[in-house]
Image (spheres, helix red, strand yellow):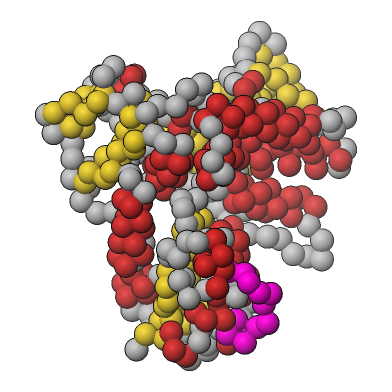
């Protein structure tokens, strides 16, 4: 065993880490990335996350076979992974090794057979699936394995009706599998307004996806799952009960790094409770999104190389949009009605079905609805929920408008190209769609 020193040590090869490694090298600093799984070089997104899942979702909607879709996904993964790893490793002062990393104390990290000290340490180990305590769970698969199956499961059971579960339900359904979603709780999409959740559930059932709420899964077997004492046969059972920060093997306590609600505790600059140690990406708690990891990089980069006296902070991150890639897409930013009522916020409500938008006739799909909350005093948008085709694109316009304090009337009167879904925002904010 030897002790080595490096200027910068990044534990985990995620988006924020690889972007930071590139910039550290370009600023003349040595940096070593430690990743325990060579298959995860480049991070979650290009390998087992957003990009492969969206590739399969789009292939299903395009009518491709499962075999063709998987082959496309694998080819895309290699291309994207090569670009992601090259972003960091093509830099002269950046390198990576495949090894496990664990803190010995605040200054020393065990990396494989060696011990490293570093001027700065960055934890970027991402998230991992939550595996429930169910007998026979070893017979189930996670979302990562479901993205790389050689053959399509004809009877596909999903445990969990959260966002990940719904995306996989829609995906497998589009390839012709019979999908059953099992949920312990009686509620569906409890984070969303009831009218939105009800519309989504109706549409997904209309596609042939089966839902069972308020059920208990006692065992998973080679034949399927035991639900409320009865066998539900399945070719594959997917565990979709959430993801958690991947920190169990880091021995954080030895370094004095505090954990809060299962994630690494950070301050407004993403600094941990240990000196010269930062946490980035999914391990720092909050939303587990690729684009937030990108913003984590910006926060840290501004600390080191910021200009004009401006340093980006975690607290600057408000009104962050998100999208769930079901069909149609669900996207939201800011407050919904449920949140506004709970917080005692006054609002004007604008709401409409998407069916009157001309483009729905062109694509022959009139499903969906849109909602927006407006401040009665300032006319600024407080939040919006779009359950509609291309909602994942249009929600970004509303998020930007909220950041810029743009009055809703700008969308009402804006000239948009035709026929598009974005022009539906003209209609959404029209006087006739205000709910009194």
Query: Where 20 sits versus 102, above or below?
Result: below
In the image: residue 280, left or right of residue 257: right
In the image: residue 435, left or right of residue 76: left
Picture coordinates of residue 308, whole percent (x, y): 82, 66
Query: Where 21 sits versus 199, above or below?
Result: above
Q: Which residue appears farthest toward the left when viewing the image? A: 229
Picture coordinates of residue 278, whole percent (x, y): 62, 42
In the image: residue 159, left or right of residue 58: left
Q: Which residue is painted at 73% across and 42% down in the image?
A: 19
Q: Is residue 118 visible?
A: no
Q: Is residue 224 magenta?
A: no
Q: How many marks?
A: 0
Where is the C terminus found, in terms of image quarters? bottom left
Q: What secondary structure prevails in the magenta region?
A: loop
Q: Nearer the viewer, residue 103 or 401?
A: 401
Q: Nearer the viewer, residue 262 or 340?
A: 340
Q: Which residue is painted at 50% across and 79% down in the image?
A: 428
Query: Where 424 sits versus 22, above or below?
Result: below
Picture coordinates of residue 209, whole percent (x, y): 33, 44
Q: Nearer the viewer, residue 155 or 95?
A: 155
Q: Which residue is painted at 30% across and 38% down in the image?
A: 180
Q: Which residue appears farthest toward the top when viewing the image? A: 1
In the image: residue 108, left or right of residue 370: right
Q: Nearer the viewer, residue 58 or 305?
A: 58
Where is the N terminus found, in terms of image quarters? top right
Query: Where 223 sits versus 24, above or below?
Result: above
Q: Is residue 22 visible?
A: yes
Dividing the picture into quadrants, the one containing residue 102 is top right
Q: Which residue is painted at 42% across and 29% down in the image?
A: 142
Picture coordinates of residue 3, whole percent (x, y): 70, 16
Range of residues picked out in magenta: 410-421
């Amino acid at each position: 065993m030897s002790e080595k020193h490096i200027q910068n040590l990044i534990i985990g090869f995620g988006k924020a880490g690889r972007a930071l490694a590139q910039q550290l090298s370009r600023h003349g600093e040595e940096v070593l990335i430690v990743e325990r799984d060579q298959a995860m070089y480049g991070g979650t997104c290009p390998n087992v996350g957003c990009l492969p899942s969206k590739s399969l979702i789009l292939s299903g909607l395009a009518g491709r076979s499962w075999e063709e879709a998987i082959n496309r996904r694998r080819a895309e993964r290699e291309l994207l992974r090569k670009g992601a790893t090259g972003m960091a490793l093509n830099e002269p002062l950046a390198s990576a090794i495949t090894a496990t990393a664990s803190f010995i104390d605040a200054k020393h990290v065990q990396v494989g057979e060696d011990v490293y000290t570093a001027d700065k340490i960055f934890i970027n180990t991402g998230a991992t699936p939550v595996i429930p305590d169910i007998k026979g769970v070893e017979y189930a698969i996670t979302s990562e394995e479901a993205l790389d199956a050689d053959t399509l499961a004809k009877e596909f059971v999903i445990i969990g009706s959260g966002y990940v579960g719904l995306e996989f339900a829609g995906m497998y359904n589009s390839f012709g599998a019979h999908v059953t979603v099992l949920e312990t709780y009686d509620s569906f999409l409890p984070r969303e307004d009831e009218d939105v959740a009800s519309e989504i559930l109706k549409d997904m059932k209309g596609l042939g996806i089966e839902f069972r709420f308020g059920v208990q899964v006692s065992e998973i077997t080679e034949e399927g799952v035991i639900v409320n004492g009865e066998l539900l046969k399945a070719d594959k059972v997917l565990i979709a009960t959430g993801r958690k920060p991947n920190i169990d093997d880091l021995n954080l306590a030895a370094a004095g790094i505090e954990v809060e609600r299962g994630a690494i505790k950070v301050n407004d600059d993403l600094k941990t409770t240990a000196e010269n140690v930062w946490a980035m990406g999914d391990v720092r708690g909050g939303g587990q999104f690729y684009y937030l990891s990108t913003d984590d990089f910006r926060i840290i980069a501004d600390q080191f190389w910021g200009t004009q006296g401006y340093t980006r902070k975690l607290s600057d991150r408000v009104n962050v949009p998100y999208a769930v890639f079901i069909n149609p897409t669900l996207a939201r930013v800011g407050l919904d009605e449920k949140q506004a009522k709970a917080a005692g916020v006054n609002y004007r409500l604008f709401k409409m079905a998407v069916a009157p938008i001309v483009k729905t006739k062109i694509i022959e799909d009139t499903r969906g609805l849109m909602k927006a909350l407006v401040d009665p005093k300032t006319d600024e948008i407080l939040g919006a929920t779009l359950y509609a085709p291309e909602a994942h694109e249009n929600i970004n316009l509303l998020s930007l408008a909220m950041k810029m304090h743009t009055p809703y009337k700008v969308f009402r009167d804006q000239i948009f190209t035709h026929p598009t879904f974005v022009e539906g925002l003209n209609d959404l904010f029209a006087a006739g769609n205000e709910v009194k």
